[in-house]
Image (cartoon, rainbow, N blue to C red):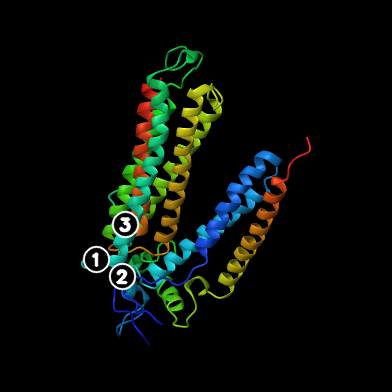
Amino acid sequence: MAHQAHAYHMVDPSPWPLTGAVAALLMTSGLAIWMHFHTMTLMTLGMILLLLTMYQWWRDIIREGTFQGHHTPPVQKGLRYGMILFITSEVFFFLGFFWAFYHSSLAPTPELGGCWPPTGITTLDPFEVPLLNTAVLLASGVTVTWAHHSIMEGLRKQAIQSLALTILLGFYFTFLQGMEYYEAPFTIADGVYGSTFFVATGFHGLHVIIGSTFLAVCLLRQVQYHFTSEHHFGFEAAAWYWHFVDVVWLFLYISIYWWGS
Amino acid sequence: MTQRRAVSGPTGNVRRPGEDERTEWREGLRPGVPPVSSPAIFVTSTKLGCEAGRQMEYLAAIRVPAMRRLIQVSDGVSVHLKKDLIDKLLYRTTMGLRVGGVVYCLVALYVAAQPSNK
């Protein structure tokens, strides 16, 4: 029986990268087909394939790390670099939308009435639901830190409760934001104000849903005893992502909701 | 080729005499940290002694050592097919959707590329 003489992880050949690429092909082509021929079949097929890919790929990573022990310290270091780089790319993604907002709002054109917010736009009061949303996300940042310390101290019950509370706060934010979208006095079609508002806050909302899902998977893993007080990188990655989502909201609140009103 | 499993944190599936699954799992905790959480100030519980064992299995039974034994079997099977039936079913469904999806996509794009007679 041969053994490796290094601490790195030589991964088994996997079908999931190709499957993920095919899912991306189906979703993008499907989007074009939906727009021109009004049929959603191809795009739906792509989304199902994407979900299957994500489930099986991440299931395999859990098997390799938690059950096979391949996530040695050097491997974990690589995973940390990877997550940091991914979050950095997301920061640049949001930077683009903030750039678009400031481009239009710092020098409003005559077509908008030469002012910001544009003539005819009734903005949302930043000290009502948006302020509650801010409090909810800040509180969830506290609870996720509480969960981390509980895991590190080996306090199982507290870890589960604080993590569950974090997820509930995330769902509460999503619910409140959904209500705001429904009740808003303007739409995405209402000029550049509507476009910048709904695209920026809409993508942020999507990231809140992604972050909540990531934390929910961590909760399931914590219940199943996957995490130890020394080794719980999956949870740390979820917590980093959650803090990133929180910070993006703070920038959104200050720029679009408060200054922009 | 089989890779030696480098385990960090809890021990692998090796047990010392007198140990059970709980002991194996408890070794994942830092030394000196009790496996049972100390009661928070707003929880009043007077049944610490006899419930210490049961508290370890709060909400779910410990299945990690059993999963380790299953997944670490050295049979040359890739990690994505280790659990036999369910893994095969998911894999074949995904492959079917992948191949069928590519064919459907190419046909749809070919049809969409035809000039319209408007």
Q: Is residue A243 above or below residue B86?
A: above
In the image, what residue type sits under mark 2?
Arg
Residue B44 horizontal/vertical position (percent): 32, 53
Q: Is residue A19 above or below residue A162?
A: below
Q: Which residue is mark 1?
A: B30
How far is disc 3 from disc 2 in space, using C-alphas?
Answer: 26 Å
Mark 1 neighbour class, 10 Å CA radius: few under 14, some 14 to 19, many 20 or more: some
Q: Secondary structure at mark 2?
A: helix
Same-chain check, marks 2 and 1: yes
Mark 3 neighbour class, 10 Å CA radius: few under 14, some 14 to 19, many 20 or more: some
Q: Which residue is mark 2?
A: B26
* Residue in the picture at 42% in, 78% down: B72
Q: Which residue is mark 3?
A: A80
Depth check: give the residue in front, A206 or A212. Answer: A206
Specify the quadrant that holds the C terminus of chain A: top left
Give the residue furthest to the bottom.
A1
Q: Is residue A180 above or below residue B113?
A: above
Depth check: give the residue in front, A235 or A70. Answer: A70
Residue A95 horizontal/vertical position (percent): 38, 36
* Residue in the picture at 39% in, 65% down: A225
In the image, what residue type sits under mark 3?
Arg
Q: Is residue B16 visible?
A: yes
